[in-house]
Amino acid sequence: MRKSQLSGLWIGFAMGGLCGVAAITGLWLSRPTETVLEIPVQASATRTETMSVATGDIDSNVDGLFTLDSLTGDLQCYVVNTRNQQAPPSIFRSNVMGDLQIDPTTKPQFLLIVGRAMFQGGRTVNARPANSVVYVVDSVSGNFVAYGIPWQENAASRGGAQAGALIPIAKGSARNAAIREP
């Protein structure tokens, strides 16, 4: 081999080596620096000044739409009929004003969020709590209440609409100190 051919060969090896080092460095620099825990969520919530809405699991086949009217305190859960989309939805209702001990002279400011709960007890032949708990907070007083949904799986599997009251299952206060108005 001639000297020029050997030089070209060594230059080729050097270029290939540099490309390999660059590729490995790029892979190393692009890896995440910390582990990210991904939690699958299939719920959403939003609000305006007068209405809050959220979605949450009712059972393995359907979500419920939770609405809270800030003007009246009416909380409702609508569940579409998965057996017959033309049939009326199931509706569960409650008014949060009494459960939150709202002072009638104040204007409440509500927050609404839905959490997941797989209740072990409380099942009867016809009804069990749904897979969601809806939480309502009055940010003025700091009081909150959690409601359960008395879901009848048998009625849902037959395509029947359900109706009833949302059941308060927990109450409390998120504020540890009394707030005085000036």
Image (cartoon, rainbow, N blue to C red):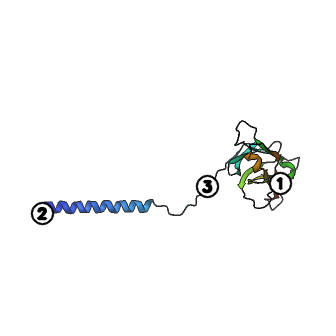
Residue 101, above or below 88: below
> Which residue is pictured at 72% across the width and 51% down the height?
113
Q: Which residue is mark 1?
A: 168
Return the mark for residue 127: none
Q: Is residue 103 left or right of residue 9?
A: right
Choose between 144 and 167: the one closer to the eye.
Answer: 167
Return the mark for residue 3: 2
Choose between 175 and 72: the one closer to the eye.
Answer: 72
Return the mark for residue 40: 3
Residue 3 visible, this angle: yes
Counting other residues with Cα less than 10 Å from the Cα at mark 2, is it few (<14), some (14-19), or many (20 or more)? few
Disc 3 on helix, strand or loop?
Answer: loop
Q: Position of residue 172 (x, y in %)?
A: 82, 59
Q: Are marks 1 and 3 in contact (CB under 8 Å)?
A: no
Badge 3 amino acid: Pro
Could you give the CA–CA distance between mark 1 and mark 2, rounded to whole angstroms?
A: 90 Å
